[in-house]
Amino acid sequence: MKLTGKSIIGFTHGSETEKTFTAFNPQTGKAVEPKFYSATNEELNRAVESAKRARIKYGKLSGKEKAKFLRQIAENIEALGDDLIERASLETGLPNARFQGERGRTCSQLRLFADLVEEGSWVDARIDFAQPDREPIPKPDVRSMYRPIGAVAIFCASNFPLAFSVAGGDTVSALAAGCPVVVNAHIAHPGTAELVGTAISEAVKTCDLPVGVFSLLFSSDYEIGQNLVKHSDIKAVGFTGSHIGGRVLMEIAANRENPIPVYAEMGSVNPTFILPSALENDYVKIAKGLFGSFTLGVGQFCTKPGVVILPESEQLSNFADFLRELTMESEASPLLTSGIKETYEKGVEHRNENVASASGEAVTEGFEVQPTIFQTNADFFLEDKSLSEEIFGPTTLLVKSNTLAELLAVANKMEGQLTATIWGNEKDLEEYAHLIDVLETKVGRLIFNGFPTGVEVCHSMVHGGVYPATSDSRTTSVGTRAIERFARLVCYQDFPQESLPDELKDENPLEVWRMVDGEFQKN
């Protein structure tokens, strides 16, 4: 497929505007054709107005119709074949194998949500029958369920060109909820975005859906994205990116005449607590696993273990020495953009001024950087707030604690995180029970004897956490509960049967699970 470099607005393309940009090959630092045209504010308005017109008809589609649409998107993405894989690799510097796996995850996610909406019970239908003879006053007939919130703005992530971008979790959960979407493409991988955007647009046509169900906007700066959030017909925002970017969108949304929710996932240092029993058992295995985790994807995962807390033990020095050796022998790899590289180098340079570090030889080709580890003690970590800040890229910080009190102090100091990990044995879980209690108040996912990189897409997954990891700790951006972000509860009181949604009718024609007078049933 030949790339046009133009925004997708419903079933039409944007114009060739004066503002243009290109992707870059991170391995060489050179521009990649073609050039892409930034959307105009007029095109943005057309996209949102089209989404507004589509919202009622699309929102009333049956679960089976939405499921058909989501599965068609998955088929269209798979039909792109090697063109998609090669373009994603070219724009990110990451290997083809990475995107073969990410494409599989993306399409599996689409089909998971298709199954969810086809079955239909996610709407949490509840019925309380009327009691006209109740004293002292009659009880009305009351029924409620989730309904779509309206048009949603989605911002693509830099580090997942497929799974957290145009057809990623935010888009899929919004479409599954019955919401039209307007996607703001990421400047780092616009060609990948256009390929996937075209696949979604074609699925809209194939399924004979309203024209405004999907649009994709390109932009060389922040203006279009910010104006998208300001638009009065946008009813919610999904964002995966930096804390700075997330906060800007949150403030814009809060300052609107009609404020809207921003579901922002903004990063994390994902503290990892490696207890003495774990190091005594096999410190080499854990060191290799940790190194693989904080360098996976060149350290550009929001679940990268960025701070590792280690109580004093006999094997601590051996573990640290071996991890340092792995780091110094490692090869440089390119980060996604020149901006990410610059921020990484500044962060490493600043931290080098304060704590001990180890890394391989510096390189300058393209956007390449060298993995780096730092080491300090709990006292210094507790004094220096900057040590608990995320450095996006292949680096981690080892923090040595001499007492249980110090370890708990570190855990208590931590801000909200996406994940926290504990390495040890079952006895440790009893001895360090208070540590678990503390971490439970700060994270969305607790991991035992594993590493946080790798987020399983399933019904039970929680990819969220307390601020500043996310803007709303009650939600998740991965797993089927993500659909709840883009739905709101609507109650119907004393409505006749023919005017109720099928999920709330007495005969339950869709055979979904419902709470009826306080009891869950499917009849």
Image (cartoon, rainbow, N blue to C red):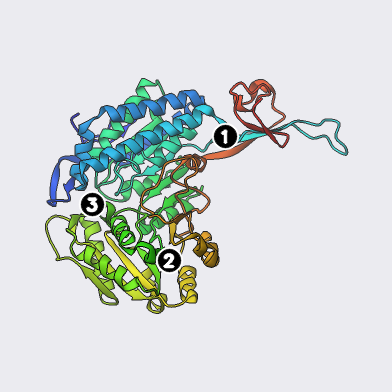
Q: Secondary structure at mark 1?
A: helix
Disc 3 packing (10 Å; few <14; some 14–19; many ≥20)? many
**Left or right: where 174 falls relative to 219:** right
**Left or right: where 492 falls relative to 261:** right
Q: Earlier in the sequence, mark 3 or mark 1?
A: 1
Residue 37 shows up from this direction: no
In the image shown, does 201 or 442 lie closer to the viewer? 442
Q: CA distance from mark 2 to mark 1?
A: 46 Å
Q: CA distance from mark 2 to mark 3?
A: 38 Å
Q: CA distance from mark 3 to mark 1?
A: 39 Å
Q: Position of residue 234 (x, y in %)?
A: 45, 41
Task: Give above or below for 201 relative to 91.
Answer: above
Disc 2 packing (10 Å; few <14; some 14–19; many ≥20)? some
State the residue at coordinates (81%, 31%): 131
| Closer to the eye: label 2 or 1 | 2
Q: Earlier in the sequence, mark 2 or mark 3?
A: 2
Q: Which residue is mark 2?
A: 277
**Left or right: where 215 falls relative to 444:** left
Q: Amino acid at mark 3?
A: Leu
